[in-house]
Image: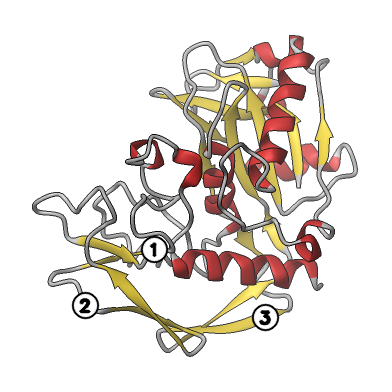
Amino acid sequence: MTIVSNPALEVPIDSGNFQQDPITADQTAFGGCAAYIVKALFGQLPNERETLLTDPRIAAEIRVVSLFVSDLNPEDGNSLVGEYVGLLDSRQSAFVPFLQRYNLAADIVFAVSQSGSCTRATAWFTVDDDGRSGVPFNLDGQTLHHFYYNKVPGTVAIHSSADSLTAIHEFSHALSSFSNGVVVDLYFDTDDSQQYGPINRKFGRPIPGQFSNYEGTVFASDTQRDSLGYPNGWQSYHCRLIDATLPALMDNYYLASNKAPENCQHDEITRRFLLDRIRAKISR
C-alpha cells in the first residue's frame, strides 16, 4: 500500500485545468494524514472496533510506503486527484505510470490532497488482472476470484483533514474489485447489480431472510438496517450486521446512536469477503 501526496489537482475533474495541490507545501499535514490512515486501517483509533487488519498474521504482511512529492509541475501526468462538486475524485488511470517513476507498485494507493474547496473522500475499486492466478470463490452459484495481482490498484482520494473511519471506509471500497465483487456505500438506494455486482447491497422487496451464500456459508439479510431503518420506498437491503445496534461501516456511521462512529463495523459478508481478498493477496 502506498500513501502519496497529490502533486496537482485537476480543477474541476476532466477539465484539463491543473493547479498545484497545497499539500505539496505542507509536509507536516501530509505526515499527520499518513499516520491517521495507518491508525484507522490497523484498528488503532480510539474506540475503533473494526478488526479487518488487526490480526498480527495479516498486519505483519502488509507493507506501507509513504511518499511525499513536492517538486512536480501541475500537469496531467502529475495529477492523481480532481475536484468534483465537493468531492475529491482519484484519477485512476494516472496512478500506475506515476508510481512506476518511483519503482513502486501497490494494491491500494491513497492520494492525499489539501484542496481548499473539496474535502470528501472517494475511492475507485481495483482493476484485477483477471488473466493471472488467484483464489476462486463461489457467490450465489457464480464462481469469482480473489486475484493476486491488479492491472490498476484500488485508489483513494482523501483530504488531509480526514478523520474517524473515513480511511478504512474508502480502503474497503478500493480493495474490492470491478470484476470480482465491489463493496459499495449503503446509504444510497441504488440497484447497480447489472453494472457492478455489489457484494454488500441487494435490491427488491420483500426483504428475504437469506442475503447471500458465500462459499457455502449462508448470510442472513438485515431486515431493519440497524438503528437507521430503511426509509419508506427504499428497495435496497443489506447483509446482517456484526453489531445490530450500530450502522455498518459502509453506511452512514456518523449517525451512530451512541455518538461514537468508531464503534461501527462491517456487516458479516463484507468483512468475510474483504478478509479473504486480503489473505489471497498476502499469500501470493
The three-letter code of the residue at mark 1 reads Leu
Left or right of 186? Residue 158 is right
Residue 63 picture location, percent across and down: 83, 50
The reply to whether the C-beta atoms of the residues labelled 2 and 3 are less than 8 Å apart is: no
Sequence-earlier tag: 1 or 2: 2
* Residue at point 36%, 50% (across, down): 247
> On the image, which quarter does residue 67 sit in?
top right
* Residue at point 23%, 60% (across, down): 236
Give the CA separation, mark 2 to mark 3. Answer: 29 Å
Q: Is residue 148 visible?
A: no
Residue 185 picture location, percent across and down: 39, 50
Give 99 or 257, whichever is nearer the viewer: 257
Give 181 or 207, whichever is nearer the viewer: 207
* Residue at point 68%, 56% (across, down): 53
Q: Which residue is mark 1?
A: 241
The label shown at residue 208 is: 2
Sequence-earlier tag: 2 or 3: 3
> On the image, which quarter does residue 239 sit in?
bottom left
Q: Which residue is mark 3?
A: 135
Most extreme residue toward the left, as rendered?
232
Residue 166 picture location, percent across and down: 53, 37
Give 149 or 240, whichever is nearer the viewer: 240
Q: Secondary structure at mark 3?
A: strand
